[in-house]
Image (cartoon, rainbow, N blue to C red):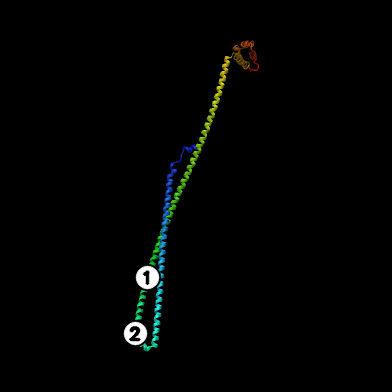
Amino acid sequence: ENIGLATLQVPPHPDQWMPKAERARHEEELYALKLRLDATVRQMKDEVKAHRERRHVATSELAHMQERYRIKLDIHGEEVDSLKQAAEESAHMLKLMLSTQHDEMSLEVQRYQRALAELAREYNGVRSKLLGEIDGLKLREKDNVAILTSSRYLLGMEMAQRQVEATEKTKIIYRWRTESGTLRSELMSERMHCARLELWVAAMRKDVSNFMKEIWLRERLLEHQKVMNENETRALQYDLWKQRTAINKLGTDVGALFLFFTQRLCNLAGSRRQHNEALRANGAAQVLAAMCRGPRQDLRRLATRAVGFMGWDGYIEQ
């Protein structure tokens, strides 16, 4: 009871607990921070995926260009080989024709020379054309090498940017974990404070329950005491009524009044010396002697006993 009264008299300080609205606000801020972090992570993942796709496209284009360059080199080699083979075959045929038909061919030397000159011009044209194509391919190869170098530089920049983004992501995650730990500790302290408040409320409820039980017991005791008081009052009123009735009966009934008077004198006679002397001083002996001669037997018997007790004080200390 003393502990319950102390708890009721000294409530906790308002600074030791936080309202439910404040706790709800903290939970909403934590949820919003988590949503922003998830959105940032998804955006970074999408950017990394886009960078990977662009790198894949550049790699595929480079492979396609290398394949085209290899095909052109093969075609050029085949054309040069075919031209060499054709020239060798023509020279061999000319030698055979010159050796077998020197006379006949003498007339046609000029024509063959012109034909050879024409072939030489065609060969030179084809050769110059192929050399131009080779130079163009070399230039394109240089361009491709430059593109690959720039792609490598871009890839390096992309990797550096990814590292920077990873660092930023790590910082964001660290900040989120720090803030989450702080909010978690605040939430734990809030829960502990709520638990203490619940214990305090439970103790107050227990005290109130005990007080209500004690009040109920006191009310029952009061009702019981009230019933007992009513019974005692009724009994006292009944005793008072009996006494009043007895006194009334005694005061109005002459026979009962004489019987009561004689009984009281018989009880007082011989009990003490002073009682006997008082009875003698008041003339009780004459009255009792007169009653001994009366008509009622019970009065005579009591009067005789009283007279006998008045004359005998042997058992009383003198």
The residue lying furthest to the front in this view is 104
Q: How many numbered marks are there?
A: 2
- As drawn, is 51 to the left or to the right of 302? left
Looking at the picture, how far across and down is residue 87, in whole percent?
A: 39, 81
- Which image quarter is the C terminus in? top right
Q: Name the residue under label 1.
A: 140
Q: Which amino acid does label 1 sit on?
A: Arg
Mark 1, mark 2: which one is toward the viewer? 2
Residue receiving disc 2: 111
Residue 163 seen: no
Q: Which residue corresponds to the image point at 41% horizontal and 68% vertical from the top-left?
A: 64
Q: Is residue 308 left or right of residue 170?
A: right
From this view, report whether residue 173 is shown above or below residue 203: below
| Residue 303 image offset from top left, x and y in percent | 63, 13
Write the residue at 53% across / 29% down: 223
Q: Where, by quadrant of the figure, is residue 44 drawn?
A: bottom left
Q: Which mark is residue 243?
A: none
As drawn, the residue found furthest toward the bottom would be: 103
Q: Residue at x 41, y 58 (%)?
A: 46
Callout 1–callout 2 Cβ contact below 8 Å? no
x then y, percent, for residue 174: 43, 54
* Residue drawn at the location 43% of the way across and 46% of the way down: 24
